[in-house]
Amino acid sequence: MFTGIIEALGEIGVTEQRGGDLRLHIRTGSLELDDVALGDSIAVNGVCLTVVELPGDGFIADVSIETLNFTTAGQWQTGSPVNLERALTPSTRLGGHLVSGHVDGVGEVIERHQDARSVRFRLKVPTELARYIAHKGSISVDGTSLTVNAVSGDEFELNIVPHTLAHTVFGTYQPGTKVNLEVDVIARYLERLLLGDRAANQGDEFSLSTLVNKILD
């Protein structure tokens, strides 16, 4: 688990194709690795990766086909900047929200404009994720814990303050940038609970939105 509070900016080093999936060398910059061991988890742009080697200037991780298919990891190239966060410990301050590092889908930046000293971003999300995003709710974008400032259909807005712009990959975002999204896990559990006994029906495509529509009917 993670908090969504980015600890450092790193960059992608060598990318190596291996039997259909990928092995990555992530240079970690100022991220402290003294207490990181083989098998530990580090979130890279919100993607939970397992440390398989520690070469000294960062770590090496394998990226599965599943991860390549459902995140932006397949687009990373040598030199690409990435957000980094080590897994939380029992003594970690939970400054953001609980983030699992299991990406739900890929969104797209569709607008960026200055808003006083902050920058306002508008993002478009996959239709199936829109119902989990709420005004003033939490969302993880490339591993950064953020508060949703506005929602309209399958689009939402974020207000990014100067510190976050300077210390995360948000500073590089432009319209067309693809980002990893992880919705608040509480919203997913709430949906499952509201389904009640229907949640146990294997293969049932019944969703919370369907349930609400049936209640309103």
Image (tube, rainbow, N blue to C red):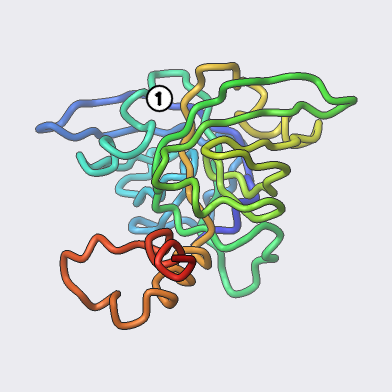
Kindly identify the residue that appears in the image at 72 percent across and 30 percent down: 165
Q: Position of residue 98 (x, y in %)?
A: 56, 63
Q: How many marks?
A: 1
Q: Position of residue 108 (x, y in %)?
A: 49, 27
> For residue 116, what is the image quadrant?
top right
Question: From the viewer's perspective, is 189 left or right of 51?
Answer: right
Q: Is residue 178 visible?
A: yes
Residue 106 percent location from the top left of the image? 42, 35
Closer to the camera in the image, 23 or 193: 193
As drawn, the residue found furthest toward the right would be: 116
The residue lying furthest to the bottom in this view is 197
Q: Quadrant of residue 58?
A: top left
Residue 56, percent across and down? 44, 38
Residue at image coords 24%, 60%: 205
Q: Residue furthest left?
A: 19
Residue 35 showing in the rendered view: no
Residue at the front extreme of this rendering:
217
Q: For numbered disc 1, what is the local secondary structure?
A: strand
Q: Which residue shows up at 57% across the image and 31% down it? A: 123
Q: Looking at this view, is 210 or 176 the one in front?
A: 210
Question: Which kind of residue does numbered mark 1 sit on?
Answer: Gly
* Front one among 102 and 105: 105
Q: Nearer the viewer, residue 206 or 41?
A: 206
Relative vertical location of residue 165 with respect to residue 105 in this rendering, above or below: above
Q: Which residue is mark 1?
A: 13
Name the image quarter holding the C terminus: bottom left
